[in-house]
Image (cartoon, rainbow, N blue to C red):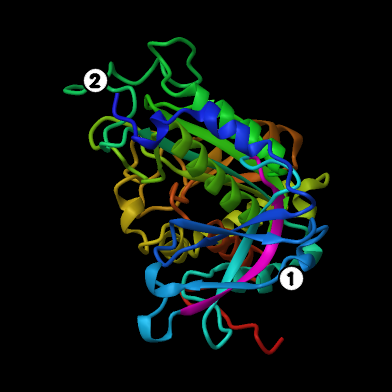
Amino acid sequence: MSVSHSSRLNKLVREQYVRLPQDGLVQVTYVWIDGSGEGVRCKSRTLDKEPKSIEDVPEWNFDGSSTAQAEGSNSDMFLVPVRMFRDPFCLDPNKLVLCEVLKYNRKPAETNLRHTCKKIMDLVKDSHPWFGMEQEYTLLGINGHPYGWPDNGFPGPQGPYYCGVGADKVYGRDIVESHYKACLYAGVKICGTNAEVMPSQWEFQVGPCEGIEMGDHLWMARFILHRVCEDFGVVATLDPKPMTGNWNGAGCHTNYSTEEMRKEGGLKHIEAAIEKLSKRHDYHICVYDPRGGRDNSRRLTGHHETSNIFEFSAGVANRGASIRIPRQVGQDGYGYFEDRRPAANCDPYAVTEAIMRTTVLNETGVETKDYADH
C-alpha cells in the first residue's frame, strides 16, 4: 500500500508533546486558500491568551510569492481572520482560524472569492438562505493510484460500494471517521458521511448553514480532511473525474432554500427559482469549477448520475438532472432543492454567490452586477 513516509512515524511519541501544559499560551493556526483556488495553506503563531472571538485574533501576513499569489518583489500578503474553530489536532485551548487573503493594497487576492460572496450574502440576508453541500472526494495512495485498488488492475464494477460495509467493499473508513470526529470537535457543521459509488470515493455533508457560513465551514472541513489524510499517509483529491472509464465522478451537490421556500406553499418559489436558473445555465457552469467548466466537462456527461453539461434539466427525485427536487419536497409542497452541477473542487463561495445572484437578485446573462455603490 502506497502511503507517505511521515505516516510511518511513531504517533505515540507525538502524543507526549501534545499533552504538555502551555502555561496560558495558545497556538493559533491560520488557514487560507492559495493561488490555485483549490489548495489550502496554514501556519501557526502563539498568542498570550485564548481568543474568545474572531476579533481577538490579530491580522498576520505571509509570502505570497510562494503560494502563487504575489511576485517576489512585492510578496507580503495580509491574512485577515474571519472565522474561528477549535483545533482538533493540537486540542483546546488552541484554535484554527480561517482567513481571507488581501494584497499589499488591501484589495482581495484573485482567489479570495469570499470577499464578494460576503457582500452578496449581506444584500440577501432577509431571504435567510440556507445551504447544505455534499462534498465528494477520492482517497489516493501517495503514488496517485486510488487507495485500496489493485496495483495493476481495477476493482469489480460499481454496485456494492455505495454505503457499503465490509473489507472488500470500502477502503479507508478509519480516515473518514477520524475526519468526522475532528470536524465535530472543531465546531464545523458536518452533518453526515457515506461511502460513494466508486470504491475509495467518499462523501461528507456540511450544513445547514446560512449565508457566508456555508463557504467558511466547507473550506475548514476540507482543510481538516487534508490534515487527517496527512496523518494516515494518503491523499484526498477533489478532482471531479479522478478515474476515466465506467466510474462515477465527484461532485459537490448543493442543497438550497430561502425562508419562503421552507414555508407552506414554498414549492411555487422553488419552481420560480429553478426557472431563473434554467435561463442562466452557462453562467453557473462557468463558476461551478475553478477552470470555467473545463473540469466539470469530464464529469457532466449525462452518464453516471449526472446531467449533460450543455443542457439544463430539472425533475423530482431525478439524479440525472441538473436540479433535483427531493420526492418528499414534492409531496409536502415546500422545502428545498438540490443543484447537482457543482464539481467536487468548486469554490463554495462562488457557488453560493451565483445561486443568490440568480434566484434572489434576479440577475440574468453571463455578466454579474456590481453592487459596490448600493
Residue denoted by label 1: 122
Main SS type for the magenta part?
Answer: strand
Query: In which quarter of the view is residue 337 placed?
Result: top right
Residue 326 visible, this orientation: no
- Residue type, label 1: Asp
Residues 318 and 163: in front is: 163
Residues 131 and 20: in front is: 20
- Residue type, label 2: Pro
Which residue is at 76% across, 47% downward? 93
Query: In which quarter of the view is residue 127 placed?
Result: bottom right
Per the rendering, the mark at residue 150 is 2
Label 1 to label 2: alpha-carbon separation: 50 Å
Per the rendering, the mark at residue 97 is none
259 vs 103, left or right, is: right
**Residue 4's spot in the image, x, y percent?**
34, 35
**Residue 309's spot in the image, x, y percent?**
36, 52
Q: Is residue 77 above or below residue 258?
A: below
Q: Secondary structure at mark 1?
A: helix
